[in-house]
């Protein structure tokens, strides 16, 4: 797990790369200890920053990994 300071640093790097539309090497190349909690926390830092700058959150991601979820939802999409 990464420290809060490292998470903030990485969030800032990702935000800058997005604004500049430049690719970054995967964070796991530099921080092999990064985990899923770190990833979500870094994402949340950037979401909060964008909202503070005036952006709006207008939806949420729905995971469709389980085949049962996929088939259930697809029946209602037509």
Image (cartoon, rainbow, N blue to C red):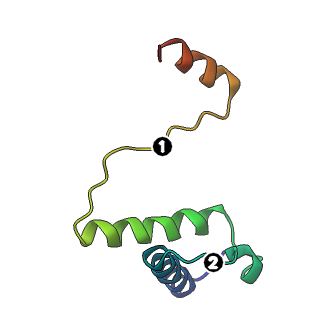
Determine crowd level at label 1: few under 14, some 14-19, many 20+ residues with C-alpha closer than 10 A: few
Q: Which mark is residue 61?
A: 1
Q: Is residue 14 left or right of residue 28?
A: left
Looking at the image, which residue is at 73% across and 74% down?
A: 28
Vertical order, 52 against 56 (above or below):
below
Vertical order, 66 against 29 (above or below):
above
Q: Position of residue 14 (x, y in %)?
A: 52, 76
First in sequence, mark 2 or 1: give its number. 2
Whole-number angstrom distance, CA of label 2 to CA of label 1: 23 Å
Image quadrant occupied by the N terminus:
bottom right
Q: How many numbered markers are drawn?
A: 2
Q: Cβ–Cβ below 8 Å for labels 2 and 1?
A: no
Q: Position of residue 29 (x, y in %)?
A: 76, 78
Q: Report the residue that reaches farthest toward the front.
A: 21
Residue nearest the observer in this picture, 18 or 40: 18
Q: Position of residue 36 (x, y in %)?
A: 65, 61
Looking at the image, which residue is at 68% across and 29% down?
A: 66
Determine crowd level at label 2: few under 14, some 14-19, many 20+ residues with C-alpha closer than 10 A: few
- Element type at mark 1: loop
Q: Is residue 15 left or right of residue 48?
A: right
- Element type at mark 2: loop
Label 2 vs label 1, nearer the camera:
2
Q: Mark 2 — residue?
A: 24
Q: Which mark is residue 31?
A: none
Vertical order, 19 against 77 (above or below):
below
């Amino acid at each position: 797990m990464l420290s809060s300071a490292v998470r903030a640093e990485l969030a800032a790097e990702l935000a800058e790369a997005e604004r500049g539309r430049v690719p970054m090497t995967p964070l796991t190349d530099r921080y092999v200890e990064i985990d899923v909690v770190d990833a979500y926390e870094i994402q949340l830092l950037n979401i909060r920053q964008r909202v503070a700058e005036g952006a709006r959150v207008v939806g949420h991601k729905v995971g469709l990994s389980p085949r049962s979820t996929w088939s259930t939802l697809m029946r209602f999409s037509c």
